[in-house]
Image (spheres, rainbow, N blue to C red):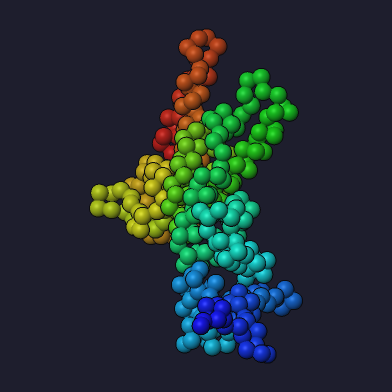
Amino acid sequence: MSSSADTTAQAPAAGQAAKKIRSQPPDVIVSVGSGESMREFPCYKVILSFASNYLDTMLSSSMKEGTLNRIDFPDKVPEEWEIFYEFIAPQKSGRSKHSNSNANINSDNVMTLLPWFHEFQMNDYVRDCDDYIAQHFIGEEGRSFWKYERHQNELISVYWPRKKRRKEAFGTILNVLQLAHKYDLVSSKDVMGKKIAAIWKLPVNTHDLFDFPVAKSLLRLVLPLEIDDGNGLRMKLGGNKHIWPLVEKILSPHISRLSQEVIDDNVSFPHLFYSFILLYVEKKRLQAKIETLKDDKVTIKLRYEAELELNWLEKVKL
């Protein structure tokens, strides 16, 4: 006759305790930072390995990290590792599409997580960051927001805060565009490139935003350039498709006076490019001035003077 013990799991022998897998201690130490700021984090190999093929390879038995059960990141920030590991840990689910909201990519963690995801070749996570940045980082501002001058009847108390927000918003767009190129964020490059292009289409109202550091940064996004057989310019490697038309428009009137040697000069060419921008903006300003001056006795002289100045600028050779 069978006893109840035959149909149930055998109890552990005397002196033995059942040890659950989740109660196993961490099996790898991750050291982050250097000097007094260095911190050591007990982690689980399995969590790191499933999160990233890069880390999985690093922790293999043939690698130093796998043999010593230790990974060192001396140039990283300990607090950033905490955010990264918490994100990929199973109790946090590790994916934004899962139900646990603590694992979502958001405005508080996206800029911290992105470099880690990129370094560890976690491409799905990089795309999540790209999608979030492209959709959430910049609001939709109208043409009037970007105008440098005061609007008609705009109060000083409104104008100065708008002018400050305008500068900050442009700086954010430019920084995100540069970040998108650094980490090859396809959606963010497209969205931010479009925004820069739209702002540049209003040069009379936005010229102050495109100072020399900005001009140099935008030029860097399309370099290297080369003069083609048709006496035109083209990108050698293919840069931002929205920034290139802006750069080409600035350079094309001067292409006959440019040489490959000048274009390849990383020190002087950005300065020359910026001087072309200033010339372009001044022409646009004069054209706008001529357009607004009506043909009457008061303004006809001003219009004539503006046209003379524009004609002179058209002949300028820098």
Q: Is residue 209 above or below residue 73?
A: above
Q: Is residue 213 above or below residue 300?
A: below
Q: Is residue 309 above or below residue 296?
A: below
**Label total for image:** 0
Who is closer to the viewer here, 181 or 36? Answer: 36
The x and y percentages for residue 285 are 51, 30
Which image quadrant: the C terminus? top left
Whether residue 9 sits left or right of residue 124 in the image: it is: right
**Where, by quadrant of the figure, is residue 165 drawn?**
top right
Q: Is residue 206 above or below residue 128?
A: above
Which residue is at 45% across, 62% downward? Answer: 123
Which residue is at 33% across, 47% downward? Answer: 256
Who is closer to the viewer here, 212 or 257? Answer: 212
Q: Residue furthest left?
A: 229
The x and y percentages for residue 253 are 37, 41
The x and y percentages for residue 301 are 51, 17
The x and y percentages for residue 142 are 54, 31
Who is closer to the viewer here, 183 or 244? Answer: 183
Which residue is at 63% across, 43% downward? Answer: 168
Q: Residue furthest front?
A: 1
